[in-house]
Image (cartoon, helix red, strand yellow):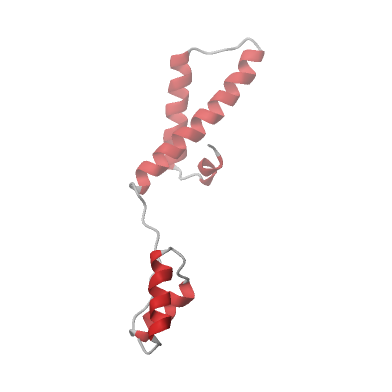
Amino acid sequence: LGIAQASLTNLEQNEVEDKITLASLRKAADALNCDLVYALCPREPIGDQIKNQAAIAARSIINASEKHMSLEAQETSRSSQQQAIDELADELASELKSTIWNHE
């Protein structure tokens, strides 16, 4: 790599301890005549993540709406609530609304 053995050992130790820096990786890549590629890989398909998060957002939105409706004695049935959640989740997912990530 064109670096001292001690530096190489330090680089390897930092990697083992999850302390390696992008700067160190970039230097190693340059020394090997390589490009550094930094990527995040999803643990599950992105489409599934979007659907799951859309369902969470829809549930949050519908539950908040239901809370207000119950205060006005306008509650809906559980099946109606679930249908509204499902429909809203489908809409949020298909339109790729960024607001789905604002709900937990």
Out of 4 and 54, give the one closest to the viewer: 4
In the rendered structure, the answer to whether residue 98 lies left or right of residue 86 reads right
The answer to which image quadrant residue 33 occupies is bottom left
In the rendered structure, the answer to whether residue 92 lies left or right of residue 68 reads left
Out of 73 and 45, give the one closest to the viewer: 45
- The structure residue drawn at horizontal position 43% and vertical position 69%, both measured from the top left corner, is 14
> As displayed, is residue 85 above or below residue 36?
above
- Residue 74 in percent (x, y) is at 60, 12
> As displayed, is residue 71 above or below residue 47?
above
- Residue 18 in percent (x, y) is at 43, 63
- The structure residue drawn at horizontal position 40% and vertical position 68%, both measured from the top left corner, is 15
Residue sitting at the far bottom: 2
> As displayed, is residue 15 above or below residue 23?
above
- Residue 63 in percent (x, y) is at 55, 24
> As displayed, is residue 11 above or below residue 39?
below
Q: How many marks?
A: 0
In the rendered structure, the answer to whether residue 89 lies left or right of residue 71 reads left
Out of 48 and 1, give the one closest to the viewer: 1
The answer to which image quadrant residue 11 occupies is bottom left
- The structure residue drawn at horizontal position 54% and vertical position 30%, both measured from the top left corner, is 60
- The structure residue drawn at horizontal position 43% and vertical position 15%, both measured from the top left corner, is 79
Residue sitting at the far right: 72
Residue sitting at the far top: 73
Q: Considering the image in quadrants, where does the N terminus appear?
A: bottom left
